[in-house]
Amino acid sequence: MTALTELSDAELQDLVVQAGGKAFQARQVAHWLWKHGVTDYAQMRNVPARLRDALAAAHAVQASRVRHADLAEDGTEKLLVEFGDGETVECVIIPDGERTTLCISTQVGCPVGCVFCASGMFGVRRNLTAAEIAEQVLHARARLGEGRRLTNLVVMGMGEPMLNLDGLLPALRRIHDPDGIGMGARRITVSTSGYPRQMERFAAADPSYNLAVSLHAADDRLRKQLVPTATSPVAEIVAAAHRYFGQKGREVTYEVVLLDGKNDRPRDADAMIALLGQLPCTVNLIPWNPVEEIVAREGLRRPQTLRVDAFAAALRAGGLKVTVRRQRGADRSAACGQLRLRQSPPPAGAPAG
Ligand code: SAH
Ligand code: SF4
């Protein structure tokens, strides 16, 4: 059964009219879906019962539900979201002072297979639909108490957003649309492991979001070790990232997951300065959050703080703007980038990507 949230505005209008309703009532229904996030037809108070019944006969309200919620001591809340076919993803609500950031997923699993990442360990199972992506925002919003609202959205959960643009683009439109969820585009950041062609398509659709590129290494050979399926040279990825903002001169964020002795050496900093030194950007260093299974298999380690600081200092000395992601309890308990693994490991025989 398709959910109402899966329908475009035009499809919803057709459906309402076919059921004997008026066009303006379709808009009312859409408001209940996206402004109020209702989960039940009975909550659509100004929609006549006859119309509600006609819609309910063929459509569920939402395409997903929260199966499990896990509140960490530091206030971070992780939601396990389940879809009609039983697949799950996680999204994470991360309070931080005045800000409340939500991190959402775009695929079940991930086909990219970065060696350090839990999301990619078992390959990808499927893309999320636009509704399955956007509903994560509805679920998170519904968990927040009075007076709290989501201030920021990061597409940094499970999956590679550029490999599911057909789901992502309409989902972002719905999240951003003032008649939809109504979050400002500048408060939304999409993170990609770097697909120049798809980044062009993303730019053509809407270049108003913030863009983060998971670079990890400025050297092609090293990057290929960390992101084994990466086929584009870093120079092309970086060029595509800066074309995204056109002439606007906005900054790209480059994320670098730091792995001890692998990509945090002085020469790695030098290569990064040579690649990014002249560009409007910030480099965000993320000391790796160890994933047990990966430590055992790949022998990767999180670098000591001193090493992280030295790497940051080297980049700064080369003229780059640098931030270092703080360690939060949330990072340990599984925040962005290492989701779902503990909650629901895939069944034996799951495709290996
Ligand atoms: N696929 C996209 C978005 C999801 S991953 C991408 O790769 O950008 C979001 C971020 O989390 C990426 O920068 C990724 O490199 C990082 N990440 C993944 N696993 C991590 C881990 N175990 N520790 C720290 N960061 C991690
Ligand atoms: Fe996929 Fe991003 Fe994880 Fe790489 S870091 S496997 S692209 S989710």
Image (tube, rainbow, N blue to C red):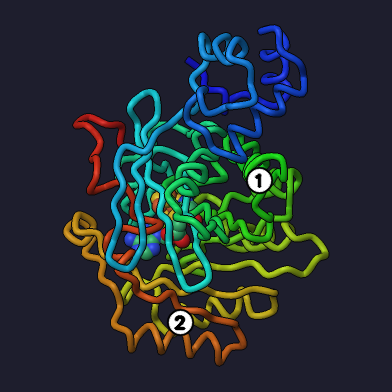
Kindly identify the amino acid type of the residue bearing the numbered disc 2.
Arg
In x, y percent, where is residue 113?
A: 38, 48
Q: Nearer the viewer, mark 2 or mark 1?
A: 1
Q: Is residue 103 above or below residue 314?
A: above
Q: Secondary structure at mark 2?
A: helix
Q: Which residue is mark 1?
A: 197
Q: Residues within 10 Å of mark 2 (few under 14, many from 20)?
A: few
Q: Secondary structure at mark 1?
A: helix
In x, y percent, where is residue 240?
A: 68, 57
Question: How many numbered circles does the render carry?
Answer: 2
Separation of disc 2 and disc 1 at Cα?
29 Å
Q: Nearer the viewer, residue 278 or 326?
A: 326
Residue that appears at 23% across and 40% down? 345
Q: Which of the 4 image quarters holds residue 297?
A: bottom left
- Looking at marks 2 and 1 on the same chain, the residue that comes earlier in the sequence is marked by 1
Q: Nearer the viewer, residue 77 or 146?
A: 146
Residue located farthest toward the right when viewing the structure as drawn: 247
Q: Is residue 118 above or below residue 138?
A: below
Q: Which mark is residue 244?
A: none
Q: Nearer the viewer, residue 190 or 9?
A: 9
Q: Is residue 198 left or right of residue 102?
A: right
Is residue 224 visible to the viewer in this orientation of the structure?
no
In x, y percent, where is residue 49?
A: 58, 14
Q: Which residue is mark 2?
A: 267
Q: Are marks 2 and 1 in contact (CB under 8 Å)?
A: no
Q: Is residue 112 above or below residue 278?
A: above
In x, y percent, where is residue 221?
A: 45, 63
Residue that appears at 47% across and 33% down? 127
Kindly identify the amino acid type of the residue bearing the numbered disc 1.
Arg
| Mark 2 CB lies closer than 8 A to ligand 1 | no
Is residue 200 visible to the viewer in this orientation of the structure?
yes
